[in-house]
Image: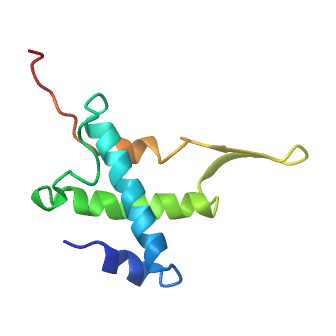
């Protein structure tokens, strides 16, 4: 499934280049979680079409990235010193927990 039209429909004010950037960021986050030590795998070479389970995860990740741009997912705010705190630097831990971990035997 091509998720770009879904993102374009939800956020019609975004340019195509911005949507592409957000989708690529979401894919990079997923690859970093799936294969944290295998640097030969990147979001450009990964075969997303063979993994349709990630389609909605990517949409949800783009949603969170857009929310972060608008700082609507702040977990803490302090008034006089103006300090915002997010629950995680990239996306929420709940979203990251939805990614299945790969387990294998070290050879």
Q: Does residue 43 lie above or below 70 as drawn?
A: above
- The quarter in which the N terminus is drawn is bottom left
Residue 72 in the image, given as x and y percentages of width and height: 62, 60
- Tell me which corner region of the image, top left, top right, bottom left or bottom right, holds residue 9: bottom left
- The quarter in which the C terminus is drawn is top left
Give the residue displayed 50% in from the left and 58% down from the top.
65
Taking depth in this image into account, of 27 and 80 the one nearest to the observer is 27
Give the residue displayed 24% in from the left and 41% down from the top.
41
- Tell me which corner region of the image, top left, top right, bottom left or bottom right, holds residue 62: bottom left
Q: Is residue 91 left or right of residue 50?
A: right
Q: Does residue 98 lie above or below 61 as drawn?
A: above
Residue 54 in the image, given as x and y percentages of width and height: 23, 56
Taking depth in this image into account, of 27 and 86 the one nearest to the observer is 27
Q: Does residue 20 lie above or below 48 as drawn?
A: below
Residue found farthest to the right = 80
- Coloured how? rainbow
Number of numbered callouts drawn: 0
Give the residue displayed 29% in from the left and 51% down from the top.
43
Q: Is residue 37 left or right of residue 22?
A: left
Residue 103 in the image, given as x and y percentages of width and height: 15, 27
Give the residue displayed 43% in from the left and 71% down from the top.
19
- Tell me which corner region of the image, top left, top right, bottom left or bottom right, holds residue 37: top left
Residue 6 in the image, given as x and y percentages of width and height: 33, 77
Q: In this view, does 87 lie to the left or right of 106?
A: right
């Amino acid at each position: 499934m091509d998720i770009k039209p879904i993102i374009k429909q939800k956020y019609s004010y975004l340019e195509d280049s911005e949507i592409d950037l957000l989708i690529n960021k979401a894919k990079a986050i997923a690859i970093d979680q799936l294969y944290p030590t295998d640097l030969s795998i990147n979001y450009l070479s990964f075969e997303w079409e063979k993994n349709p389970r990630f389609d909605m995860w990517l949409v949800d990740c783009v949603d969170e990235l857009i929310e972060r741009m608008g700082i609507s997912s702040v977990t803490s705010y302090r008034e006089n010193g103006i300090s915002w705190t997010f629950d995680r630097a990239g996306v929420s831990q709940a979203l990251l927990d939805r990614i299945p971990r790969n387990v294998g035997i070290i050879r």
